[in-house]
Each structure stands twice: as C-alpha cells, then as structure tokens.
Amino acid sequence: MIKQPPKGMRDLLPEEMIKRNYVFDIIKSVFIKYGFDPLESPSVEYSEVLEGKYGEEEKLIYKFKDKGGRDLALRYDLTVPLSRIIAANPNLNKPFKRFQISRVWRYDRPGKGRYKEFWQCDVDVVGSDSILADAEIIAVTIEIMEDLGFKDYTVRLNNRKILNSILESVGVPEKKYNEVLISIDKLERIGIEGVKKELREKELSPKQINGLSSFFDISGNNQQILNKLKKTLKNGKGEEGLNEMYELVSYLDKMGLPKKYKIMVSLARGLDYYTGPTFETVLNGVEMGSVSGGGRFDKLIGKFSGTDIPATGTSIGIERIIDVMKELNFDLPKQKTLTKVLVVNVDESTLQDCIKLASFLRKNNVSCQFNLSGKKFGKQIKYADSLGIQYLAIIGKEELKQNKVTLKDMVTGKQRKVNKEALLKIVS
C-alpha cells in the first residue's frame, strides 16, 4: 500500500501542528482585535463558482465530477467563496468584517513555500468603499508580522487603476491588460530582461516596452513616487488611483504603524479580480515569494449577485511564514505533545485511582493522560520522556496510604509527595 500522501501535500504530525497552531493563534488574535469575526466555507464548490475569476491561474483549479455527474472543484482561494456567500446573504450587516483560516488546493508545481494543499489566513472588509478599509487591512498585516517577530519586511503598495493608466499611457490595448500585468508581476522573480522578453512574446512594441520600463524605474519615498506619477498620469483612472494612494498612505501614517510600507509601481498581483489598491508583504533578505497578498475587489461579488459591492482584503501565507520562521530559528514551540501530566500507575492495583486522578485534572482543565496500554512502570516513564511530557503524577501503594501523589518534574528532575489540590496548583 502507498504510504506517502500525494505530491505537494503533507502529513502534519503533532509536533508540526503545535507550531502551526501557535502561529494561527497569534494571527487570529490580531484579526479579533480589529473586530473581524470567523467564517467558514465548504472545501468544495461548483466549478462555475470558481471559473472565470482567476485569469491565467484558473488552470491550477482542481476540478472533478461527483457521482451525480455534477462539475465540482476544490476551493482555490477563500476570496471567491466569500463573494458567493455575500451574494447569497444580502441582508448581512455592512461593513461585514470576516476572517477565515482554512485549507485551499492548487494544482501547482511544488517548491519552496509552495504546496498543492495549504492553509490561507484571510481577512476581508465587505461593504465599504472607503480607502480606510484598505488601510485597516494593511494595519492588520503589519501587526501580525510584528507579533510573529519579523522585523525586516516590506509591505508593498500599488493600485490597479494606476497600472491600467500606465498601460493606457504607453498604448497597450485594453484587451491585453491582464496578460501584460501577469508578466509585470514576475519582475522580482525573472528580472527586467525576463519581463521584456515575455512582453515581446506578447507582441508589445519596443516603444511600449521601454515606456513601461521607465515607470518601473521610478524611485524615492512614497510621496515622491506619487508626485512623479502625478506629472505623467493625467487620465481619469490614473488620477483616481493616485488620489486613493495619497489617501491610503496618509491613513497609514496616522495609524502610528512601523513605516514598513512602500509604494512599488511594478506590483501587479496576478489575479484578475483586483480593482483598486493592491498590497503584498515580502521578507527582506530571504529567498521567498510574498508572505501575504491582497487588494480591493469591488467587482467580484457582483458576478454572483448582479450588484457590485465594494470589498477589500488580504491573505496571510501561513506556509511560507512558518517555513521562514524555521529557517531563521524563530522561537517556535518544540513540543511533541500538548499533554502536561502523565498519571502513572506503579502496578495494576492503582490503575483505578489513576483514572480518578486523571478525571480530576481534566475537570480542572489540565491536559493529561494515563496508562491505556497496560505498560509497565518503566515503559510509562520512557513514554513520557519520549513525548516531552513535563510532569509525572505517580500513584503506588505508599501514595494511596498517605492519600498523596508523587509529582516528578521531568525538566528539573525534582520530585515530591503532594495532595491532589497542591498537585493541581503546581501543574495548572
């Protein structure tokens, strides 16, 4: 029998899941602090829900037929299912602020920080067209990065309206916008020459390619970049995008955040559904793609409801974040178990008393185990040691006579006889 999971998917044993849940809890605490509530969507959607939403990325959707012949697909991200849910529940209070931590599936080529099955941590605001909503999403991202212990990172900012205006200004036909943006989005990975090569293959003229390159050379602080763009982009969409970015930066500056946000003119984000501000987080000096990414998607919900509803959000790339935290030796939990106490019976005659003590501890919210497999005393000790369980609560005939328990701290090696109330106080 095959013992390995499918390529690009993983078994996550308790030691790994403890690390993962530690990171999830930090992220979730920030989401809740900012007033976002939990939401869940099915792992499987009708194929037509996902189709036509992701552009070139659509080829990565896992599609299949069920036994009734229905066309289904594993969810590709958490944004499109959210849009379906909003359309199906028009009476939800707006703005609707939600977070979701769930698995998604993509038929992608596995690589560093890239898997076919992985978790996303999404946070979104639906029903607000204010740029303040985008600023809040970025603030959440920055606080999460800080709380996780990252210091050297950059949240890159751009606006799809600015990019479309740039494409228009150099004469790129509108029907080619999405495919050109996909190439531009690869600038960090393949370099300017690689992007130029792709643009030539997409039949852009040398003048158009050079025109685009000149925009990507714009540098300076956020205000300087916007001021330089303002001199060139005179059409309506360009001015609208620039005004949004001036407003966004102004809000972020007022929020008292670490100033780790930077406008990057070449930031495109490859998905078709972005309509305004876009943002992603990269770790400086680490060979890894973005560890968060998102933006405004004001037209996506309308594809389901027939009425556009403004929305913005981002996804925290938990897999890449955890991979980097390990690589950089962050202080992640090293536990193999969440069990705090192993209740040990010296022989079979004290097993019933061990069961009673375990029940007492559990009623008082202390995680514990007792001997389920008839292991001898020595093997119970080895079991606790192999899992890194900190405390042993040992019950033998002598302990029963004294109505006490021998408590051993496996970290310090110290042990003493205590009553169960004292035991609870120590291990709680």
Image (cartoon, rainbow, N blue to C red):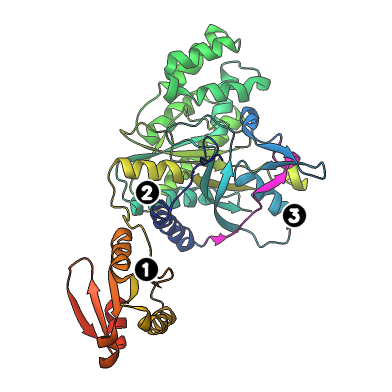
* First in sequence: mark 3 vs mark 1: 3
Secondary structure under the numbered disc 2 in the rendered image: helix
Q: Nearer the viewer, mark 3 or mark 1?
A: 1
Tell me if residue 319 comes above or below residue 33 in the rendering.
above
Q: Residue at x 50, y 26 (%)?
A: 185
Q: Quadrant of the N terminus?
A: top right
**Dot 2: within a 10 Å radius of its alpha carbon, few (fewer than 14), some, or many (20 or more) residues?**
many
> Which quadrant is the C terminus positioned in?
bottom left
- Contact? badges 2 and 3 (CB < 8 Å): no
The residue singled out by tag 3 in the image is 88
Give SS at disc 1: loop
45, 176: nearer the viewer: 45
Label 3 SS: helix
| Residue at x-position 32% and y-position 35% | 284
Q: Amino acid at mark 1?
A: Lys
What are the residue bounds of the magenta stretch?
Answer: 36-51
Separation (CA) of disc 2 from disc 1: 45 Å
Question: What amino acid is labelled 2 in the image?
Answer: Met
Q: CA distance from mark 2 to mark 3?
A: 33 Å
> 120 or 414: nearer the eye?
414
| Residue 45, magenta (yes or no) | yes
Q: Magenta stretch containing residue 289, yes or no?
A: no
- What residue is rendered at 51% in x and 40% in y? 4
Residue under circle 2? 145
Q: Is residue 257 above or below residue 238?
A: below
Q: Is residue 191 above or below residue 352?
A: above
Determine which residue is flagged by label 1.
375
Task: Give the alpha-carbon distance from disc 3 to disc 1, as whole Å.
Answer: 55 Å
